[in-house]
Image (cartoon, rainbow, N blue to C red):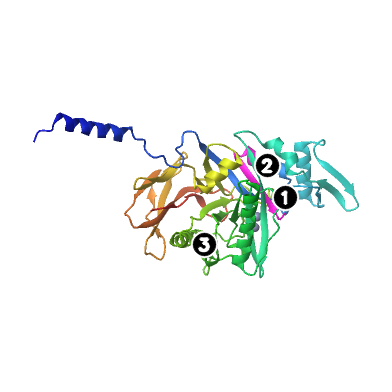
Amino acid sequence: MKPTISFLLVLSIIFLLISCQKEPLLIGQKENAQWYKGNLHTHSLWSDGDDYPEMIMDWYKSQGYHFIGLSDHNILQEGEKWVRVPDNKIRRSVYEKYLKKFGEDWVESKEDTSGLMVKLKTLSEYRSKFEEEKRFLILKSEEITDGFDGKPIHLNATNLRELIAPQKGNSVVEVMQNNINAVLKQREETGQPMFPHINHPNFRWGISVEEMMQLKNERFFEVFNGHNMVNNYGDSTHIGTEEMWDRINHHFIKNNQELMLGLATDDSHHYHLLGPIYSNPGRAWVMVESEALSPESIIENLEAGNFYASTGVELEYFGLRYNEYSVKVKPEEGVNYQIQMIVWFDGDERATEMEAVPANSSSYSLTGKELFVRAKIISNKEKYNPFQKGDFEVAWTQPIVIQ
Ligand SMILES: [Zn+2]
Ligand SMILES: [Zn+2]
């Protein structure tokens, strides 16, 4: 049968419609957005970090970071706080460096019977020295430092307004949940976007995967923390944080909860001595695709999963389009990459790590049996001053639920 004119016309209209339809964008492909680099977990002399907040902000800004959450233990950088400069060579030179960089007009110090004292600058005093539109943003943060039965239970609160005292509770789960609820309550009362995240669950084996599975309304945890004592990779009797991540998400999907997203942070305390026994800056961060460098836009995109965690590997984009989960690396000259898809198939008891593909980009075609998919990108570039000796630079994309 010969095709009629009208049949051909319909065909060409369909063809035109299909070709005009825009391809759905992957994370990293939005035209009016860009990648912003940030570390959400940092300490200063306001608690147990060993440098002045201005020096820390100066370091992160000069290293190309766009946003920082300076999250000291149970304290906001407000009010009057004096710290003694201990009479040792390193701390004395830290003070000298601070004085040299910011000048006598800025640095406030006094000598008393206990020695040299320095008044720490508050966030509202120092933030305007560093913040710059589209370039650098400071998020008011706190590490709510709680515990139960000798176990450390730490949660960061990012972009909060008022200090949150540790809420305590009668179990590890209750302590976590009470602190999560306190952050979410402040968010509701103030209308200001802010979020809690669970820190380093394997620090002194404080929080188990079963305990995190019981949480409600918790969207983030640290799949990687650069502090030297946090056991990211587990040990012979404890699972690592990546396995925790998948198991939590399997449980959350089965219980119709939103996915837990994985952050990477420095948890930096030591800014002068570098090495495996110190928690140094520059070990891990997040890259967020955001329309603006504002707390609102950064948090909205974090909550939407428009970010990846990294210890060095940069990505151009990742995400799900039609039935393909794709990743594309922004390759560094002379560095090779392996892309591994991690898939949880419905009915399985654990995630399947697909064979790593040596390439700068890779796709996984859905079979219809997946619950969620994520990717891990491992480079052959050794990490400078790593969390653990022999670590290579890595990136983790956020998991995507397969409906
Ligand atoms: Zn901590
Ligand atoms: Zn910390």
Q: As shown in the figure, which amino acid type bears the numbered disc 2?
A: Met
Q: What residue would you read off at disc 1?
A: 76
Is residue 278 shown to the viewer in this render?
Answer: no
Is residue 291 shown to the viewer in this render?
Answer: yes
Instruction: Find the distance from the CA under tag 2 to the CA under tag 1.
Output: 16 Å
Mark 2 vs mark 1: which is more N-terminal? Answer: 2
Q: Which residue lies at the image location 55% right of the left edge and 40% below the top edge?
A: 36
Of residues 233 and 213, which is closer to you in this image?
Answer: 213
Q: Nearer the viewer, mark 2 or mark 1?
A: 1
Instruction: Find the distance from the CA under tag 3 to the CA under tag 2.
Output: 31 Å
- The spot of residue 187 in percent (x, y) is 63, 50
Circles 2, 1 touching at the beta carbon (< 8 Å): no
* Quadrant of the drawing holding the N terminus: top left
- The spot of residue 54 in percent (x, y) is 72, 41
Q: Which residue lies at the image location 51% right of the left edge and 65% below the top edge?
A: 239
In the rendered structure, find residue 57 and report the number of the disc placed on it: 2
Asked which quadrant contains residue 170, the reply is: bottom right
Of residues 41 and 370, which is closer to you in this image?
Answer: 370
Mark 3 vs mark 2: which is more N-terminal? Answer: 2
Q: Which residue lies at the image location 75% right of the left edge and 44% below the top edge?
A: 122
Left or right: residue 99 compared with residue 203: right
- The spot of residue 59 in percent (x, y) is 66, 41
Q: As shown in the figure, which amino acid type bears the numbered disc 3?
A: Gly
* Magenta stretch holds residue 104: no
Q: Which residues are magenta?
A: 57-74
